[in-house]
Amino acid sequence: MLALWQSLFTLLIQTGALVPIGILGLFRWIMWLAKRLPALFYRPIENDYDTTATIVTPVYNEDPVLFRRAIDSWIANGPNRIIAVVDVTDTVCMEIAHSYAEVDVIPIDIPGKRPALAAGVDATDTDIVVLVDSDVIWDADVLKKIKMPFKDPKIGGVGTRQHMYPTNGVRATLWERLADIYLDIRYSDEVPATTRWGRAVSCLSGRTAAYRTKLLQSLREPFLNETFNGIPCMSGDDKRYTCLILQNGYHTWNQLNAQVHSTFNPKFKGFVKQRIRWSRNSFRSDLRALWQGWVWRYPFLAFMLIDKTVAPFTLLVGPVVLVLAIAIGHWELVLALLVWWHLSRAFKILPHLRRRPADLLILPIFIAVTYYMSLVKAYSLFTINEHKWLTRAVAMVDGKAARVSEAAQEGSAAT
């Protein structure tokens, strides 16, 4: 049997049947250049525009130390108001929020992030509302910079540049370092490209994003009542807000000189869970946008959404070829593939390596995880109708977000 496989594979090489694989690789590089080249022409908006702004943060079982650091950084930016919508079960953070004279506290007993965000937006009376996760630490000039794009009345939402902040505040774990690499990839290619061409970023990350207050208030109903295949959606709040902004004819912008710092799950299990949730949210939102057709008003964004949908599956061709080459003992091809993967991946993450040169040492792990993430995304697509938060003890029960035990949350799924 092995001899048969070896003969077939040799025949494939001799007849040039591997040419399609080369063409596929060339296509992936073209798609990378389609993002990287316009990204080189991106520049943040700079002007003297100023307006009133309220910070809204939904709080649920946050680390008290991080929560205090986050609040202190927001206060230093000088917002007109800070609203903390705190889950009634989080008594520690409730007490912390009340200890700040600058923070207005809204207790909420409805589980889920979306109702908390909507409650904060409803209570806002400034021109701009900035939605911020409760563990996000700002640089001193973030608020000033994210206001600037709103001088253009057609811009409805503005995002920021995120960096990984170690959960222990000192040294990052392997999985936090990998998360940091993925952040740098996104903010060096896709985000600046879609900002530069079409002013249509597909997702203003919920870690920190600013919006026109009245616009968000007018979108309350479709935000809270999003469904996919008839099943109510629980997570994906940032993606939903962004799509609603674009769908209503506004543009989205990313102000990459506005720097914020956020924690990521430090363990492998949490790392994977987050990406399953994010991938499901992206598939639901992107497929709906393509199906409804409004995204075609932003041609470059539509092009990127199609590529993001198919890319995980095309990426799996490489490992398949590697396994076949090992099986038949074609060691020259094995060596060529491994060398090429390391060189090409190092080149594509060069912006990150300039910032974190030591991460060159984990390049082999990053490559392996990248291919594993393709399987994770495939799994996410085939389980797209499952609505689990995965990192919170909240799940969809009878079509509504409800508190559940951790064990029940692990096993629950709306199908």
Image: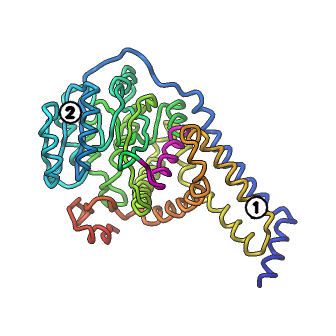
Say which amino acid is labelled 2: Ile
Identify the residue under disc 2. 82
| Prevailing secondary structure class for the magenta stretch in the rendered image | helix
Residue furthest out toward the front:
170
Q: Secondary structure at mark 1?
A: helix
Asked if 248 appears above or below 44 in the picture, the reply is: below
Does the image show residue 291? no
Q: Nearer the viewer, residue 57 or 295?
A: 57
Camera-nearest residue between 395 and 67: 67
Q: Secondary structure at mark 2?
A: strand
Asked if the residue under mark 1 is in contact with the one under mark 2, i.e. CB atoms within 8 Å, the reply is no
Residue 333: x and y, percent? 78, 63
Q: Residues in magenta?
A: 171-189
User: Does the magenta-highlighted stretch encompass residue 224?
Assistant: no
Position of residue 108 relative to residue 272, above or below, is: above
Which residue was labeled with disc 1?
335
Few, some or many residues within 10 Å of mark 1 (<14, 14–19, 20+)? few
Magenta stretch containing residue 173, yes or no?
yes
In this rendering, which labeled residue sits more in front, label 2 or label 1? 1
